[in-house]
Image: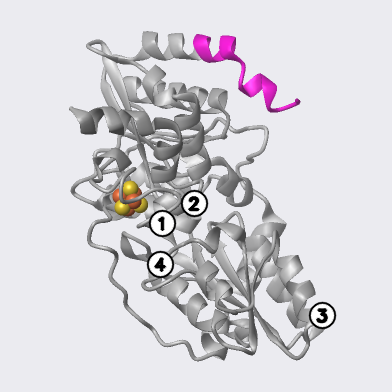
Amino acid sequence: MKFIDEYRDAAVARRLLAEISSAIHGNWVLMEICGGQTHTIMRYGLDELLPHGEKGSIELVHGPGCPVCVTPLETIDKALELAARPEVILVSYGDMLRVPGSATDLFTVKARGGDVRIVYSPTEALKIARQNPDRKVVFLAVGFETTAPANAMAVWQARQERLGNFSVLVSHVLVPPAIRALLTSPDCRVNGFIAPGHVCTVMGYGEYEQLVRDFRIPIVVGGFEPVDLLEATLMLVRQLEKGEAKAENQYVRSVHYQGNLPAQRIIHEVFEIADQKWRGIGTIPASGLRVREEYGDYDASRLFGLASITVEEPAECISALVLQGLKKPTDCAAFGMRCTPHNPLGAPMVSSEGACAAYYNYRRHQKEVTADK
Ligand code: SF4
């Protein structure tokens, strides 16, 4: 399959691994900020294939790149509150339904009679609104810069049609401010970043150059297949070994420097940059998107007067540390025992893109071996 098979070619992967081994002399910690990349790393065991010797080593740590995982508990609780209202149809992507709020999840509300519907795009949510003029349709719009254009377009389209029964409950997060926050932390030990290819397809990678200058840290935009990630790793290692810090692009088949300008225009037409809470991490300045005042009639938080709430995470869940790359999922005492994809305690175990779910799906035996020792 074009653009899949050649990026899963074992011979190419082996050659890249040999080049990494020959280039490396230092001990480097690299972070990817994309749940899809985390999933590929675990699925193909890339972290185990990379050098771990006296000549040099690479440790891969996983950043806050899973959109479901970083959606704040408060947003989930607001969605739960709306879903329980008889006049509301709460519409969402399927993986949001199992994310635990502070007391329950959307699946449970649905089972108790709440009108919660799964869609594959915000366009479907608009269709539901048109078909149900006597109900209020709220689309739970979460994600990174990648999903923001389609969500913004839905709001823009609703206004064009004067669709008065459609609104969005928004929790959009932006990658560059999150990288800045991670790099500002005194605990940060990351030497280089693999930036998310899908986000950069929309936004380009010019905005990463300021981070490179401010922190003298290399950033390489990477794709999602094993060969993509190994090539991005090699590009980072080459920079690190030469003492360089540049923003580079490995994912050239999709990402251009400026990104998708029409997509960026619709984002900025409907949304504006705002401080944003990230689940497990806290509020990061200017790291999210909120609905502009001009589109306030389509903002569920304003329409329904949803109060600002603060909710505590389950004490046992160390997702805050996992999402910052400070701990691995297997460091969590609940991993694979009290917390599984069927019974998740925290968001990183719910989403298939979450680091805990990726470790569970591909590494569970390792935890069991460790636990038995
Ligand atoms: S394994 Fe479960 S409880 Fe532990 S950090 Fe991950 S989501 Fe939280």
Q: In the rendering, which numbered label is found on residue 347?
A: 1
Distance between the alpha carbons at the discs numbered 1 and 3: 33 Å
Question: To which residue does mark 2 refer?
Answer: 351
Q: Are marks 1 and 2 in contact (CB under 8 Å)?
A: yes
Q: Position of residue 351 (x, y in %)?
A: 49, 51
In the drawing, does residue 137 fall left or right of residue 249? Answer: right
Above or below for 91 versus 36: below
Mark 1 lies on a secondary structure that is helix
- Quadrant in the picture for the N terminus: top right
Q: Which residues are magenta?
A: 1-15
Q: Earlier in the sequence, mark 4 or mark 3?
A: 4
Of residues 208 and 152, which is closer to you in this image? 152
Answer yes or no: is residue 188 visible. yes
Q: Earlier in the sequence, mark 4 or mark 1?
A: 4
How many residues crowd mark 3 within 10 Å: few (<14), some (14–19), many (20+)?
few
Ligand 1 within 8 angstroms of badge 4 C-beta: no
Mark 2 lies on a secondary structure that is loop
Above or below for 347 versus 362: below
Q: Position of residue 217 (x, y in %)?
A: 34, 37
Question: To which residue does mark 3 refer?
Answer: 131
Given the image, on which type of amino acid does mark 4 rest? Pro
Distance between the alpha carbons at the discs numbered 1 and 2: 7 Å
Given the image, on which type of amino acid does mark 2 rest? Ser
